[in-house]
Image (cartoon, rainbow, N blue to C red):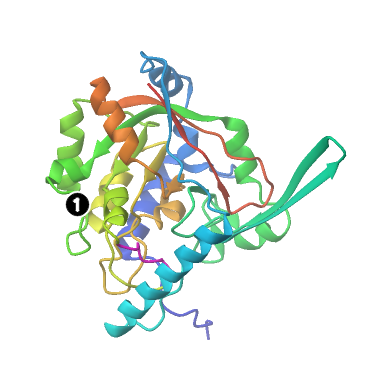
Amino acid sequence: MAEDLGPDPLAPWVRDIAKAHDAARHVDGVQCRGSVALIDEAARLRGVAQVRLGKAISLEREVETRPARLAERSEKAEAEKRDWQRLGVDELRDGHGGVELEVQVGIHGRYAHGGDVIKYDAHGVHNTHLDGLAHIGADATWHGPIPAMASKTDEDTMVNWAQHGIATRGVLLDVAAARGVDWIPAEEPVTAADLDAALAATGVALEPGDALIIYQGRDRYEAAGNVYPSGAAAVRRPGIGEDGSKWIASKDPGLVLWDFHDARDNPTGSLEVHNLIFAIGLCLIDNCLLGPAAAALKAAGTSTGLLVAAPTAIHRSTGVIINPLLLY
């Protein structure tokens, strides 16, 4: 009797997308590197051509390590948990993102020296980070196919991505503006129609390998006092749903950068977009700060720029904290 491995973690539509990708892009004996492989010379030149003003803007949320600020964030998160528990959700954790920074300062006469040792969780809903292929898998494999257990020894896709060079044309889709709202509400996840409307507003025709920068209004949501729910519990939250995830897969992006994550607007609470890491090898940068970039590009009369995302080449890494830059 075959071993019962439990329910399939992937919805049938994700499996269909994965099968189509495998048939079109996989070569026997060659490890597929996913969406980053679509970033070629033409994609980089498209990006370079968008730099007209010589300006750059960071898409990274600051990595908070100041003790007083961390205490404030912890108190706010605890209050949010209590709110969810009143609604009957018992398992709502803070969602990774922890950073431990040990700062060493030496003062020797008039000479001072500083050093530090840092330990961080590369995932969660706080810090801006790039998810590796070894972050979401199924059937004991990562995308590639790469055996999941290879991460214990010699998995190297983050190194491969770093050496390939993630630099391409970035296209910013202001979904909140297309909806006419400050932020996307949890009750109405981002759909393909929303993404089509936001893309139409740019006047840009997407090409394979472009970076999709999807602004959903998270900075305004948090400024209004809301805490973005973690992915550690299957609760509905603002973000992109199944329909929007299928749209993303159909566009063959080189990578996706976003502020809100998956809406989890489905019966099983699965991750609609994150599952594309397994299905098509999607390079995904979570928790981007996009409000300032949306305003800057609007003031400049454009929706495009050169997106540069340079991950640290760490063998066996499942993800890295990163500072994506948009030049325009």
Q: Is residue 308 visible?
A: yes
Q: Is residue 163 left or right of residue 228?
A: right
Image quarter (top left, top right, bottom left or bottom right) of the C terminus: top left
Q: Main secondary structure of the magenta part?
A: loop
Q: Is residue 188 left or right of residue 303?
A: left
Q: Is residue 205 visible?
A: no
Furthest toward the left, the residue is 180
Furthest toward the right, the residue is 109
For image coordinates 35% across by 62% down, the residue present is 228
The residue indicated by pointer 1 is: 191
Q: Is residue 328 left or right of residue 149?
A: left
Residue 175 vertical placement versus 235 (above, below): above
Furthest toward the front, the residue is 109
Identify the element where label 1 is drawn: loop
x%, y% of residue 302?
26, 23
Q: In the rendered structure, which amino acid carries the disc numbered 1?
A: Thr
x%, y% of residue 115?
76, 44
Q: Is residue 227 magenta?
A: yes
Q: Nearer the viewer, residue 144 or 30?
A: 144
Residue 77 vertical placement versus 182 (above, below): below
Q: Quadrant of residue 326?
A: top left
x%, y% of residue 158?
60, 44
Chain part drawn in magenta: 226-231
Q: Nearer the viewer, residue 89 or 267?
A: 89
x%, y% of residue 283?
46, 44
For image coordinates 60% across by 61% down, the residue present is 148
